């Protein structure tokens, strides 16, 4: 009997260099598995304190070798091990259990004990609010039983579980429920079988007192699939939107990708403690309750949209992830990039496509561009990792989606579909690579896409500069393009990348397309494109729809952007023109140059008054670029200057456009229960206008916001009003916060909003307030949603986090170190704001660096946090 927990967890004593257990795994070292496990049976004796897990693995030697069988384990107490029925004393190598197997096949049985209630990492089997549930991606299955825990080992699973019937009346696993029964001693059992071979990371089990919202979906071939969303009974009324989203997603995947669901049962379970958004376990998706539960009173329009997006994302994984999985974790974007692309297209189709694109690009710029420009930059298909959990990043997910979008743009809809059909057909049941994916697109479409592969391997955001020359005499226009990619860690020299730029020319006088849109593919470092017959002075409309994920600089005449903001025929580019116009003014004033705000307020006013634009678009277009985005444009960041510059522009807009904003605020047509894109757009515009009105006149803003807060019949308006109030020094502020708390403190998801709103407040006092909130009786550092609401939100509150005395840094550092003791994965995700230290003015830069050093030097640091902090220092 060996206690594997005796193997020390990764420790980094301050006096010693990084522990040798923080070793990197490298993509080039990939080797196929030595042993396969075609069949596994699991038997769970469930109990929160001590759960017994018996596993029977049918083991088959893979290829001609004489290496032993190595099974991964983590925090397992080994009770016994048998090979072909005979008890053995297995060797332990680090955390691995090692068995010498003479033949080519064997039956390996192990029995282990685990403690779900003590599992604060929320990986493996853990307890959340009385529910027992699992999370196995990426390497959590080894915390349940000994197994070759890697995605290219695919097995058929049979699961039996037994538990106390009163506490755990519902027992779920992947696939189909094939038998159930009573034990007579208050315990009952259920047996599940999943006919589809799957990697261990897709295994799931749930036991709890759950109730289902049940429905069904009839697939395109006429099969009826039972659908259940399992929640605590009190939450049942909040599951309607998730169920509608699921059915829409199932129909969409049939229509757009020809993909039909393959089991007769699809279960979703919502839990309150979850490290990420949700998990695509075969036939049994487990969700962070934030992405399931919603009603008008407690969820905002953005929450509803996020639920649709995440429900669809996990459902789409059934094909792009479960039926075809990843060969190794370096291929993570194979499933994630593609599935994000699929969920983005779905959301665009069920809502407003231009607004969805604006939203996606905003996320990309806020999260992925800084990653690509900082010390944590990595390729979409990384070359190495210390802890794979750190690579569930905006680069793998969102840039991965952009890269597929580029290939889809180049191919066109029909050829792209031919490519994905071939991909699903050719690799069904396999563990595939990103190269396999591109190859299938090529073979299915007949188009050579090999040039695009560099997007998988080369990190960094390409910088493209564009200049359009026009000769009125010859009516010729010439577009000069140039690209470069800055060095990133480990990649000093960069090659040019293929960059598809949807491009058109707009007449400055006619305000119409004078050269129709074409797809320009910039493949080399430089290119020149000629346009004939250009009589009017042309305006360059380029990277329309954000066809490539690049940073674009266009050499423009004064007045061009303002004109484009009125005339561009592509909605994204029109949005972009106004954003860029604002950005130029913001950067100028943040660097102490003279900034002319007049063209900006003029353009914002024209946008507000336009009859051609819908409310949702107007709201997005007039929203000022965020402070981190402004900071990204500066060589040396002074957060106070950035804040001042943005506030000055907000004030100017609020003052100059008082009437336009008042009439935007007065827009009607958004009853609280109406979730149509039009109604959501009106609420969004009203709330963006409210914030700008308050920027112009605090008193008027506070009065309006408080009135709205009191009268609101929906969370969108209530949260937005409170969002405006929290940044003001008005008496209404504290009243509203108290009222919100009193009304909603029993609802954890709404209480998260209460924490997040205060952590996001644009006030000097915010750094004191987050410290107070960390001691609030409702703060739970072990609950990922609550921790992210407070510490995660604060890290992105640019002005407050970068408080000149360093107290913001100290607060987040303390949080990271405290959280790391419980949940390394979630703690590591709080580090990125520190990674920008080199770009800040020297005093702050030094304080940020010191924080990272304090983290790296801490005793008992996890490898998750160690990897992110040490790389951030480099
Ligand atoms: N695979 C999940 C998704 O993107 C994300 C996830 C990763 C969840 C790791 C939990 C743990 O849908
Ligand atoms: Zn995913």
Image (cartoon, helix red, strand yellow):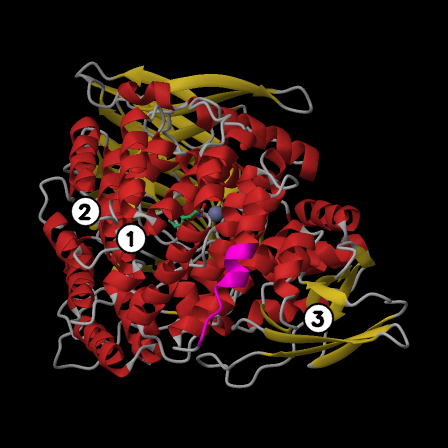
In percent of width and height, residue 516 lies at: 82, 57
Q: Mark 2 or mark 3: which comes first in sequence?
A: 3
Spatial CA distance of label 1 from label 3 is 39 Å
Most foreground residue, 202 or 63: 202
Spatial CA distance of label 2 from label 3 is 45 Å
Image position of 12 (left or right of 326): left
Disc 1 and disc 2 in contact, CB within 8 angstroms: no
Q: Quadrant of residue 832?
A: bottom left
Question: Residue at the location (65% across, 68% down)?
Answer: 453
Location of the C terminus by quadrant is: bottom left
Q: Which residue is mark 3?
A: 451
Q: Which circle, 1 or 2, is nearer the viewer?
A: 1
Spatial CA distance of label 1 from label 2 is 16 Å
Whether residue 826 can be seen here: yes
Question: Residue at the location (20% across, 35% down)?
Answer: 736
In reply to whether residue 278 is colored magenta, the answer given is no
Q: What segment is highlighted magenta in the picture? A: 594-602
In percent of width and height, residue 382 lies at: 48, 68
In percent of width and height, residue 52 lies at: 22, 38
Q: Mark 1 or mark 3: which comes first in sequence?
A: 3
């Amino acid at each position: 009997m060996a206690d594997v927990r005796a193997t020390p967890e990764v420790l980094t004593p301050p006096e010693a260099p990084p522990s040798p257990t923080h070793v990197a795994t490298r993509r080039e070292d990939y080797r196929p598995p030595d042993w396969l496990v075609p069949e596994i049976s699991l038997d769970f004796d469930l109990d929160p304190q001590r759960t017994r897990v018996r596993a029977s693995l049918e083991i088959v030697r893979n290829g001609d070798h004489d290496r032993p069988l190595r099974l991964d384990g983590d925090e397992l107490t080994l009770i016994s091990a048998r090979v072909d029925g005979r008890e053995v004393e297995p060797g332990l190598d680090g955390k691995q259990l090692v068995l010498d197997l003479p033949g080519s096949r064997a039956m390996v049985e192990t029995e282990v004990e685990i403690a779900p209630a003590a599992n604060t990492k929320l990986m493996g089997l853990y307890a959340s609010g009385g529910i027992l549930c699992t999370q196995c991606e990426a390497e959590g299955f080894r915390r349940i039983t000994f197994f070759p825990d890697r995605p290219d080992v695919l097995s058929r699973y049979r699961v039996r579980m037994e538990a106390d019937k009163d506490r755990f009346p519902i027992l779920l696993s992947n696939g189909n429920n094939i038998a159930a029964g009573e034990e007579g001693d208050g315990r009952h059992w259920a047996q599940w079988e999943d006919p589809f071979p799957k990697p261990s990371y897709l295994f799931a089990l749930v036991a709890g007192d759950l109730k289902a919202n049940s429905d069904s979906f009839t697939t395109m071939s006429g099969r009826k699939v039972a659908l259940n969303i399992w929640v605590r009974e009190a939450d049942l009324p909040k599951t309607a939107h998730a169920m509608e989203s699921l059915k829409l997603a199932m129909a969409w995947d049939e229509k757009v990708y020809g993909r039909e669901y393959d089991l007769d049962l699809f279960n979703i379970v919502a839990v309150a403690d979850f490290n990420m958004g949700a998990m695509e376990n075969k036939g049994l998706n487990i969700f962070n309750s934030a992405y399931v539960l919603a009603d008008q009173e407690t969820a905002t329009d953005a929450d509803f949209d996020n639920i649709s997006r995440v429900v669809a994302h996990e459902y789409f994984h059934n094909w792009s992830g479960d039926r075809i999985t990843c060969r190794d974790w370096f291929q993570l974007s194979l499933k994630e990039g593609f599935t994000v692309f699929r969920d983005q297209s779905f959301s665009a189709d069920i809502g407003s496509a231009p607004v969805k694109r604006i939203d996606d690009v905003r996320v990309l710029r806020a999260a992925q561009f800084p990653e690509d420009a900082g010390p944590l930059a990595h390729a979409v298909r990384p070359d190495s990792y210390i802890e794979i959990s750190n690579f569930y990043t905006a680069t793998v997910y969102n840039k991965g989606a952009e890269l597929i979008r580029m290939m889809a743009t180049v191919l066109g809809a029909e050829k792209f579909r031919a490519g994905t059909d071939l991909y699903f057909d050719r690799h069904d049941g396999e563990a595939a690579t990103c190269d396999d994916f591109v190859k299938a697109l090529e073979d299915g479409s007949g188009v050579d896409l090999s040039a695009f592969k560099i997007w998988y391997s080369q990190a960094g955001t390409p910088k493209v500069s564009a200049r359009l020359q026009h000769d009125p005499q010859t009516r010729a226009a010439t577009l000069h393009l140039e690209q470069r990619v800055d060095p990133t860690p480990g990649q000093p020299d960069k090659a040019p990348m293929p960059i598809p730029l949807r491009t058109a020319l707009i007449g400055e006088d006619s305000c119409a397309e004078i050269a129709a849109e074409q797809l320009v593919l910039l493949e080399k470092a430089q290119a020149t494109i000629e346009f004939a017959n250009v009589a009017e002075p042309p305006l360059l409309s380029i990277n329309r729809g954000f066809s490539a994920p690049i940073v674009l600089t266009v050499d423009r005449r004064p007045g061009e952007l303002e004109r484009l903001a009125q005339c561009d025929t592509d909605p994204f580019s029109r949005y972009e023109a106004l954003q860029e116009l604002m950005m130029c003014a913001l950067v100028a004033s943040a660097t102490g140059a003279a900034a002319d705000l007049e063209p900006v307020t003029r353009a914002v006013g024209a946008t507000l008054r336009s009859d051609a634009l819908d409310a949702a678009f107007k709201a997005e277009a007039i929203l000022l670029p965020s402070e981190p985005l402004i900071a990204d444009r500066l060589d040396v960041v002074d957060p106070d200057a950035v804040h001042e510059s943005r506030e000055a522009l907000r004030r100017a807009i609020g003052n100059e456009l008082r009437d336009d904003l008042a009439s935007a605020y007065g827009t009607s047509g958004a009853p609280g229960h109406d979730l149509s894109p039009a109604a959501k757009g009106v609420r969004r515009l009203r709330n963006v206008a409210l914030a700008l009105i308050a920027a112009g006149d605090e008193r008027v803003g506070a009065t309006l916001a408080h009135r709205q807060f009191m009268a609101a019949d929906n969370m969108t308006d209530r949260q937005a009003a409170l969002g405006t109030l929290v940044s003001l020094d008005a008496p209404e502020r504290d009243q509203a916060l108290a009222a919100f708390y009193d009304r909603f403190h029993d609802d954890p998801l709404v209480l998260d909003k209460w924490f997040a709103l205060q952590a996001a407040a644009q006030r000097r006092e915010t750094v004191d307030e987050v410290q107070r909130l960390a001691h609030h009786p409702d703060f739970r550092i072990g609950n990922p949603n609550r921790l992210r609401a407070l510490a995660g939100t604060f890290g992105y509150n640019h002005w407050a986090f970068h408080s000149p005395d360093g107290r913001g840094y100290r607060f987040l550092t303390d949080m990271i170190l405290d959280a790391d003791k419980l949940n390394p994965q979630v703690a590591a995700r709080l580090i990125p704001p520190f990674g920008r230290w080199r770009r800040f003015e020297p005093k702050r830069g030094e304080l940020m660096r010191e924080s990272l050093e304090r983290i790296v030097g801490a005793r008992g640091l996890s490898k998750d946090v160690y990897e992110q902090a040490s790389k951030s220092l480099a």
